[in-house]
């Protein structure tokens, strides 16, 4: 039996061969600790980290000293939000974010609420977009941080981060963006988009899992953050812990490839994405979740009326690996907070699929998946009504 077609690239991606090739020497003969400064093993490892840091900084228009390596975007979000709150609480204790953020942003915010911070969770429109006037009116003299993701992991909607950056910059409020889904998929430049803090991860962009980074603005106005991991004082004291060169080298390679191939790949993926949607739409009773075009090229999120979401997922499982639009499809579980925020009923939210197309997705795979959907959906609807 053939393995199912992988259309879950928002969840994670396979490693690109070029990334693996760059990593391999650091998993074998160049195994040194970059913090060992008395021998060549350490120097080689340190040189690799320095070069990778430069590559990552260049990819986002930052300086190498503004890159803090972390274990991924979850840790970067925690460092950005809790670290910024802790370092700036003398200025104020108010944070603004959006209700469709990833839990790696929402949970640190909820944690800060338990410590006495105030958090405003802004709503979104039916396409998942933040209203900038609502953002402006939510800001107060005691607001220290705004956190808005660049691209949503469920519905792919792209928030207007340049405009948000400008609004925050003009008012002296720090702006953090979770760019886990956006890096290498849309152009990101910390200067042009007035970003103060940006969370990155490698494994959504054909790099290794377990490595990410936080960009922390050091140019004026410099962002103060408090470390959340204390120890050997690595990463300018902001994130202690021995650096892992294979992952860091892999992340740099993955970002470089992603940025270099960005526009060609976005064109290719949006053609495939449209082909899939055009094959599904004639079924009727299907709703596109997210913005019609202001979205990640590889993202298609669809609600199917008149069937059970868990049955749909099960019927597709042999052919395609996709994720449900909600965190869990069981009838009693809470439906996706993102789909609820854009106005989907609980029932529709549970009967939603997130298709995440990626670097090796082919037209034949899209056609196979479309055919399977067209076969199973009418059957499931028939049994649902009888
Ligand atoms: C995947 C993801 C994260 C978590 O990233 P990890 O590197 O897996 O910790 C955070 N935010 C968004 C939007 C994501 O898609």
Image: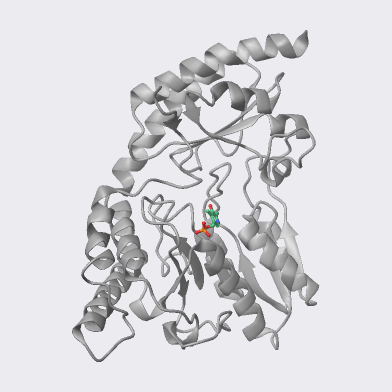
Residue 248 percent coordinates (x, y): 35, 67
Dividing the picture into quadrants, the one containing residue 2 is: top left
| 320 relative position to 140: left or right | left
Residue drawn at (34%, 77%) of the image: 64
Farthest residue to the bottom: give it.
Answer: 38
Q: How many numbered markers are drawn?
A: 0
Q: Quadrant of the C terminus?
A: top right
Residue drawn at (51%, 46%) of the image: 11
Residue 185 percent coordinates (x, y): 40, 49
Q: Which one is nearer the viewer's eye here, 160 or 358?
A: 358
Q: Is residue 166 visible?
A: no
| 352 relative position to 113: left or right | left
Q: Indicate whether 336 appears above or below 351.
A: below
Dividing the picture into quadrants, the one containing residue 127 is: top right
Dividing the picture into quadrants, the one containing residue 286 is: top right
Q: Indicate whether 65 appears above or below 151.
A: below
| 285 relative position to 192: left or right | right
Residue 256 percent coordinates (x, y): 29, 58
Residue 351 percent coordinates (x, y): 68, 29
| 292 relative position to 274: left or right | right
Q: Quadrant of the N terminus?
A: top left
Q: Is residue 123 visible?
A: yes
């Amino acid at each position: 039996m053939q393995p199912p077609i992988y259309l879950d690239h928002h969840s994670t991606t396979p490693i690109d061969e070029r990334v693996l090739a760059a990593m391999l020497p650091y998993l074998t003969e160049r195994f040194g600790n970059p913090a060992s400064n008395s021998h060549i093993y350490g120097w080689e490892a340190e040189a690799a980290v320095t070069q990778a840091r430069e590559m990552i900084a260049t990819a986002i228009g930052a300086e190498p000293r503004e890159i803090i390596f972390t274990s991924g975007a979850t840790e970067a979000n925690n460092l950005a939000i809790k670290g910024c709150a802790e370092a700036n609480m003398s200025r104020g204790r108010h944070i603004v974010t959006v209700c469709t953020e990833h839990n790696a942003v929402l949970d640190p915010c909820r944690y800060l609420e338990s410590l006495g911070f105030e958090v405003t969770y802004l709503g979104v429109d039916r396409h998942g977009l933040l209203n900038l006037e609502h953002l402006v009116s939510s800001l107060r003299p005691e607001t220290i941080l705004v956190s808005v993701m660049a691209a949503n992991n469920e519905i792919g909607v792209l928030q207007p981060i340049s405009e948000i950056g400008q609004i925050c910059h003009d008012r002296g409020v720090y702006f953090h963006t979770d760019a886990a889904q956006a890096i290498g998929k849309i152009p990101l430049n910390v200067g042009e988009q007035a970003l103060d803090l940006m969370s990155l991860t490698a494994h959504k962009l054909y790099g290794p899992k377990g490595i990410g980074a936080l960009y922390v603005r050091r140019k004026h106005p410099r962002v103060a953050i408090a470390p959340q991991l204390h120890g050997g004082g690595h990463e300018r004291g902001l994130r202690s812990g021995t650096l892992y060169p294979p992952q860091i080298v892999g992340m740099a390679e993955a970002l470089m490839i992603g940025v270099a191939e960005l526009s060609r790949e976005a064109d290719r993926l949006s053609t495939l994405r449209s082909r899939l949607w055009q094959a599904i739409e004639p079924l009727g009773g299907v709703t596109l979740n997210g913005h019609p075009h202001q979205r990640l090229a590889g993202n298609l999120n669809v609600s199917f009326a008149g069937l059970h979401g868990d049955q749909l997922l099960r019927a597709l499982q042999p052919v395609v690996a996709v994720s449900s639009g909600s965190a869990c499809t069981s009838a009693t579980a809470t439906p996706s907070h993102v789909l609820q925020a854009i106005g989907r009923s609980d029932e529709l939210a549970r009967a939603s699929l997130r298709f995440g197309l990626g670097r090796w997705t082919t037209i034949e795979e899209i056609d196979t998946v479309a055919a399977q959907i067209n076969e199973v959906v009418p059957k499931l609807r028939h049994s649902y009504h009888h």
